[in-house]
């Protein structure tokens, strides 16, 4: 049986020179790779007490929903600006390449609810830091943050001090 990291295709200089792009599609298109990735995320949270899974557009949806489904939890999408139809709160943030604004529905989390965040990858940590801020503005409590891949050299965890962070694959 192959290891999860063996399913990841790495593309140099995408989308910009100097970036090594860790391609999640090569995990997803293989039945074993997909199972291994989702199961590794479920293992990280299966013993925790929480109410909701939070996942950012778009790759966070791919992994967040199967975790929520398997654990019988609700899923809350964090979307890029302008996509959600009801009242939202928003946060701007920096990425490894570029900038973005994400939004959540104001009524997506009730005060006191415990949540986990699931995404495919942490690079600079900017996306996750913004999500944590939105969750906490709504009165939610982040009990765990889970990734399939972590680009350790970009020090994303520096933005997430004090939170329980776990990644299935760590790139030094
Ligand atoms: C990617 C990835 C993470 C984020 C990580 O999403 O899926 O959400 O970047 O980068 P960071 O740790 O530097 O914030 P992206 O915004 O590229 O959107 P996508 O999932 O739609 O491709
Ligand atoms: N998102 C941000 N940085 C990335 C990278 N190096 N590979 C894949 N997705 C990313």
Image (tube, helix red, strand yellow):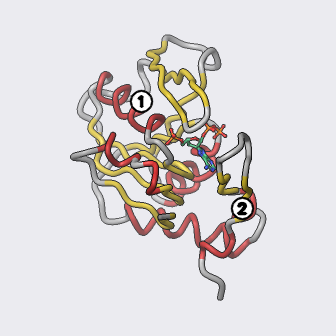
Left or right of residue 170, residue 83 in this image: right
Callout 2: few (<14), some (14-19), or many (20+) C-alpha neighbours within 10 Å? some
Q: Nearer the viewer, residue 100 or 48?
A: 100
- Quadrant the N terminus occupies: bottom right
Q: Label for residue 28? A: 2
- Spot occupied by residue 146 in the image (x, y as percentages of width and height): 43, 54
Cα gap from disc 1 to disc 2, whole angstroms: 26 Å
Q: Is mark 1 within 8 Å of ligand 1?
A: yes
Q: Label for residue 130? A: 1
- Disc 2 on helix, strand or loop? helix
- Spot occupied by residue 169 in the image (x, y as percentages of width and height): 51, 67
Residue at 43 percent of width and 41 percent of height: 125
- Spot occupied by residue 160 in the image (x, y as percentages of width and height): 31, 43
**How many numbered callouts?**
2
Left or right of residue 5, residue 163 in this image: left
Q: Label for residue 6? A: none
Left or right of residue 104, residue 8 in this image: right
Residue at 60 percent of width and 25 percent of height: 80
Instruction: Work out whether 134 lies above or below 10.
Output: above
Mark whose residue sits in front, 1 or 2: 1
Residue at far bottom of view: 1
Residue at 47 percent of width and 64 percent of height: 172
- Spot occupied by residue 100 in the image (x, y as percentages of width and height): 57, 24
Left or right of residue 10, residue 60 in this image: left
The quadrant holding residue 166 is bottom left
């Amino acid at each position: 049986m192959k290891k999860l990291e063996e399913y990841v295709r790495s593309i140099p200089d995408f989308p910009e020179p100097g970036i090594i792009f860790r391609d999640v599609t090569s995990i997803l298109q293989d039945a074993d790779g997909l199972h291994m990735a989702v199961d590794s995320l479920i293992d990280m949270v299966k013993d925790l007490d929480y109410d909701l899974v939070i996942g950012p557009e778009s790759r966070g949806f791919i992994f967040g929903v199967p975790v929520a489904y398997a654990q019988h939890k609700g899923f809350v999408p964090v979307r890029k600006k302008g996509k959600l139809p009801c009242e939202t709160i928003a946060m701007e943030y920096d990425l490894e390449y570029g900038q973005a604004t994400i939004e959540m529905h104001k009524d997506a989390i009730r005060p006191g609810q415990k949540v986990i965040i699931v995404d495919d990858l942490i690079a600079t940590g900017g996306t996750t830091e913004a999500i944590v801020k939105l969750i906490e503005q709504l009165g939610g409590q982040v009990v765990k943050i889970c990734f399939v891949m972590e680009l350790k050299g970009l020090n994303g965890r520096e933005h997430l001090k004090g939170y329980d962070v776990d990644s299935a694959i760590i790139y030094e």
